[in-house]
């Protein structure tokens, strides 16, 4: 083997949600590449090189990481959450598909992390207790028609739906269109959870329904979760409430 390339998940934010294995990879790397906000979370040790880049340069970053690894270095690419969920691991394999020779002799590994959907679910109760799916609302890499179709069919199939990349400055309206499409299929009282900056100091978790969801603020740091027809709130007699989806289809 010439070198190593590990695509590492740093989790949604807090240090306690970074796995010991991810910490080992980051600590042992000669070069660490990634989108600036993730790279900026790290404190380099002496001799370690950190290279931050824009989030639109994922394929170029993957190609560069393969090159550095092929020259014998230990390279880590960092992603927030899990590196395989709408993130850099797939970009690395795209680079390999484009140029298979770039991977020759390189020990490529993926080190998993806690994805935003799981962190958000843990905060609110157990919304993912039955079948679920994840859809990215970003139309940078797919058409809006594809997104519409997946939303409609996921709602018809009665999945709990985790929406990644729900809104950005460039596309503030799409989440509203998504709620409209979902509202055509699902009852107005369907629960919608807005989990913003989970694990960060400015974390905010709000519960709405499909009828009220359009009034809620939502940005690139928000994970939106749409309940299935069985997702409900449950309350302790002291008033505390959670959102959960029963494990059994019979509990409806
Ligand atoms: N690889 C990442 C996802 C990258 S896509 C992961 O596994 O979590 C980026 C999207 O993830 C954001 O737009 C947001 O929807 C979600 N996200 C990432 N971190 C988050 C956090 N701390 N709180 C809420 N949502 C988050």
Image: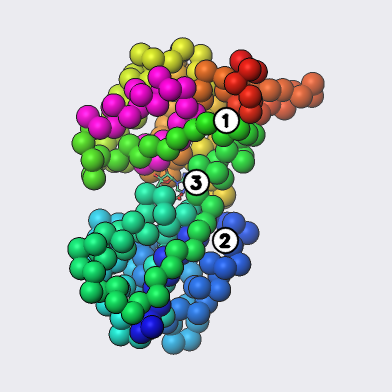
The crowding category of the residue bearing disc 2, from other C-alpha atoms within 10 Å (few below 14, some 14 to 19, many at least 20), is many
Front position in the image: 102 or 61: 102
Disc 3: residue Cβ within 8 A of ligand 1's nearest atom: yes
Residue 132, compared with residue 89, is above or below; it is above
Q: Which residue is mark 2?
A: 18
The crowding category of the residue bearing disc 1, from other C-alpha atoms within 10 Å (few below 14, some 14 to 19, many at least 20), is some
Q: Which residue is mark 1?
A: 130
- Cα separation, mark 3 vs mark 2, equals 13 Å
The disc, 1 or 2, on the residue closer to the chain's N-terminal end is 2
Q: Measuring from the top left, give residue 93's x and y in whole percent.
A: 31, 61
- Cα separation, mark 1 vs mark 3, equals 18 Å
Residue at horizontal 30 percent and vertical 85 percent from the top: 71
Q: Could you tell me which secondary element the residue under label 2 belongs to?
A: loop
Q: Which residue is mark 3?
A: 116
User: Position of 233 compared to 153: left or right?
Assistant: right
Residue at horizontal 22 percent and vertical 29 percent from the top: 145
Magenta segment range? Answer: 145-166
The answer to which quarter of the image holds residue 219 is top left
Q: Measuring from the top left, give residue 111's x and y in whole percent.
A: 49, 63
């Amino acid at each position: 083997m010439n070198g190593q390339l590990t695509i590492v998940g740093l989790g949604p934010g807090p240090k306690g949600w970074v796995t010991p294995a991810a910490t080992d990879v980051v600590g042992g790397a000669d070069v660490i590449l990634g989108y600036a906000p993730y790279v900026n979370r790290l404190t380099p040790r002496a001799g370690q090189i950190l290279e931050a880049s824009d989030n639109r340069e994922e394929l170029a970053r993957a190609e560069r990481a393969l090159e550095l690894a092929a020259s014998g270095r230990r390279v880590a690419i960092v992603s927030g959450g899990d590196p395989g969920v709408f993130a850099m691991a797939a970009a690395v394999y795209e680079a390999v598909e484009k140029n298979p020779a770039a991977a020759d002799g390189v020990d490529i590994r993926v080190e998993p992390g806690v994805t935003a959907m799981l962190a958000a679910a843990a905060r609110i109760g157990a919304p993912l207790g039955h079948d679920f799916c994840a859809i990215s609302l970003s139309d940078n890499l797919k058409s809006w028609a594809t997104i519409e179709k997946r939303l409609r069919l996921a709602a018809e199939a009665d999945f709990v739906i985790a929406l990644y990349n729900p809104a950005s400055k460039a596309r503030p309206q799409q989440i509203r269109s998504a709620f409209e499409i979902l509202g055509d299929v699902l009852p107005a009282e369907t629960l919608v959870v807005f989990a913003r900056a989970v694990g960060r100091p400015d974390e905010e978790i709000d519960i709405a329904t499909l009828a009220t969801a359009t009034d809620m603020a939502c940005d690139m740091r928000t994970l939106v979760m749409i309940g299935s027809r069985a997702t409900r709130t449950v309350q302790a007699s002291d008033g505390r409430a959670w959102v959960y989806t029963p494990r059994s289809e019979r509990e409806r």
